[in-house]
Image (tube, coloured by chain):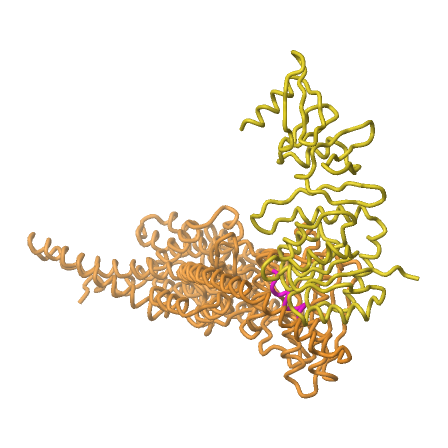
Amino acid sequence: MVTPIRAVLVDDEPVARGVLREELEAVAPEIEIVAEAENGEQAIRHIGALRPDLVFLDLQMPGMDGFEVVRRLEGPDPPCIVIVTAYDQHAIRAFDAGAVDYLLKPVGEDRLAQCVARVRALRQNALAVAESLTRLQQLAPDARPAPRKIIGKNGEAYHLIDTQHVLAFQAERELVWIVTARQRYLATQTLRVIQERLANLNFARVHRNALVNLDRVSKMAPMTSQRWLLTLDNGQEFIVSKRQAQAVQRLWSW
Amino acid sequence: MFDIFGDARYLSVNILGHAAGVLIFGSFLILMLARRSVQQLRAIRLSLFAAALALVWNVAPLVILTLGSTHRLAELAISGIAFGALSMLPSVLLDLCLEKRFAAIVKTGYGVSGLSLLAHFIELFRNPADFHRLGLAIITIGFGLLSVISVVAVLWSGEENPRAIIMRILSAMSLLLFAASFTHFNNGPSPSAWSTELVVHHAGIPLALFIILQDYRFVFVDAFVRVLVNGLLAGVFALVVAHYLPRLDYPARVLLVAAALWTFALARGVLQRAVTRLVFRRPETEAAMRDLRALGSQATDESAFIERAAAYIARLMQAPLAREPVESPDVSFPALTAAPLQDRGVEVIVPVGFSKAERHYVLLGPRRGGRRYLSEDLESLARLAACVAEQVELIRQAETRRLVMQAELRALQAQIHPHFLFNALNTLYGIIPRQVSGARRMLLNLAEIFRYFLQSEKAFVPLEEELRIVRAYLEIEELRLGDKLHVELDVDQAALRDPVPLLSIQPLVENAVKHGVAARPQGGAIHITAKREQGRLHVRVRDTGPGFETVATHSREHAGVGLENVSRRLILCYGADSTLRIESAGTGASVSFVAPCAAGDGAW
């Protein structure tokens, strides 16, 4: 018994969705199409509500396009994304590195079967799915600033967390915690790697064990002559050295 | 009119004859010596030797006549030297004629000359007339025999072109023997006999000219004739002036000299032009260059222009174009060819140097009527070649502009159409019922081909990728042509990852389908092979069609725009020696190219 794969089709052209549905039924009957979306907003809603395993996503759509849909995805158990496009040579090259797969319209059945096989294999590894999505989000086909999402694990599920919701990264022996206002997630990378990845964002290494979102620092006050107390807006406190506090201050006062 | 010829007219003619002989052989020697390196001189040493002997032969009587009969011994010595030269001349000529064949005959010739020389030497001390006759008899009989032996030997040895050699030997030797035997029947060296003897000596002049100039490809014969004409003209004027000068008073003398100089200058110009036109029938280089420029300005295609220009030059030189493959002859100036090429009908190589050290060669065959390529012909060929190169440069500039414009247009089209095109194809795909799988498949192939055509950022692709498109294309054509099209693919599995220029094979296949199969009611077959040989990828597309109209390997005139484009890109990718090779047999056309496997490594 093959586990069914729940899929959402996103394309503004009804015929294009029809072709894909028809071919999927022929080559991969275990795929259950739970919804079809004809624009970006619908896609975000469906994906948020139905949490599908797989999304076939057209890139060219009026209004919110496929790129924007990818950028806005977050939350637990992110889906596999398969890009479907008529013609986007430059984007396609970028997708070689990021997407689970990309399909060129018109899609032949052989090619589609090959794609489904790849999805099936990738679904065995939830972390790889989440990572491929974060890579996909980095791809900026135009001037839009790339959103920084980070993967965090909560129980068995992987979540995609927007960095603006992150208060701090805290290292605790071998583990690195991602601290948000609501809960903690286990990070999949070391503090050093995370710091490198977020170098362009407003994060500062205030301590050997802590990387703090400066946007979420509410208070900073001297404790002793050498130590300062740094308070985040959820009330969490970090004791930092005077030197680091001054560095934070410099970053703060720009 | 000329009193100078009065009493001693007979003698004067001989003086003139010998003077002319001295002039001829003197300037001949000078011309040969002037423009050559030591190495080249070594190569023509026999010709030099012959010319020197002929010069001595002509100088000696003049010296004797100058000395008069007062110095008997000197006269004897000098006539001995003169006859020594005459004795040596036939053996040198025979050596020249035989061109390193039959060393035994040549050695015998020198032996006979030695005997004759000995006879002339003895003549100085013993009974002169007897030994004089003996020496001449030795030459006449000896070389008569040697000539016959040489002819027989040439015939016997199965020479490729015996006629030419035999004609040369016979004409040279009979002329010489005529001259020699005439002196033989003479009564020996007496002052009175000199005059008749001298007339006969002039037979030696055309003889030497004939041998050395004609048969030894003496390229300076034109310059030589000019020197001669100028010398003779100056001589005539000098005679006239010398004749009238003493009779005139001083102002009239000045006038005469001035008039003579002025008419000489005038006459010289006229004579030179007449010689150019009549003797050499040389076309005017300037006019030819104008014609070539006109050809160039009309031409749009580089190779077509080169073909036409080469044909024009050949017509101008009244010689056929040769089409022998040349293995990069190292010539930078039009040059006469050497043995192996010459035997294949190539007389002259005219290099046409383009920019980037690229070189094309126009090969000319023998000229009509047995005329020679002379130094001035080579010079005007060089100017014409430079003119062709200049026009090619202009055509290339125009082509570059055209290609850039084409590329811009293509880019513009690519910006407008692809999304529309592929979405439309996708819609069409959706409308076609799934059951009509052939139609859907055709559409997929079509989309794949279009997508491949539109990718322009890659210069090289792996062979297998290009072949995928070839298969997609052929599937479409198979649907269209049905049984008419048979395809055979023979591809080295090891070569699948080898790089080939993007769209280097598909256009060849398309061309083969178009001309070799679709255009024929009975259809045809296409064989595609891609093989690795000695580290290079050999790609060949053959068809069973009617073949190309011309067999010319480099002619792309009939090959169409598609093939020309591929050929151009191959040259851009791999260099000038990697053009498309187009062959045409009775049973079909074959288009192939060779790609160095390593050239594009890491290119994508």
Give the camera-side residue of A222 and B21: A222
Q: Nearer the viewer, residue B351 or B562?
A: B562
Q: What x and y, as percent, mark residue A159? A: 77, 45
Identity of the residue furthest to the front in this view? A235
Question: Where's residue A100, x and y in %?
Answer: 75, 54
Q: What segment is highlighted magenta in the picture?
A: B447-455
Q: Is residue B567 magenta?
A: no
On the image, the x and y values in percent for residue B24 come to 37, 58
Q: Nearer the viewer, residue B211 or B594?
A: B594
Magenta stretch contains residue B449: yes
Side of B343 relative to B387 (left or right): right
Left/right of residue B347 with respect to residue A60 in the rendered view: left
Q: Colour of chain A?
A: yellow
Residue at horizontal 53 percent and vertical 28 percent from the top: A254
Q: Main secondary structure of the magenta part?
A: helix
- What hue does chain B carry in this figure? orange
State which quarter of the image contains the N terminus of chain A: bottom right
Pick out the residue farthest to the right.
Answer: A1
Q: Is residue B459 above or below residue B170?
A: above
Vertical relation: B327 (above or below) B181: above
The answer, for residue B287, to whether it is visible in the render is: yes
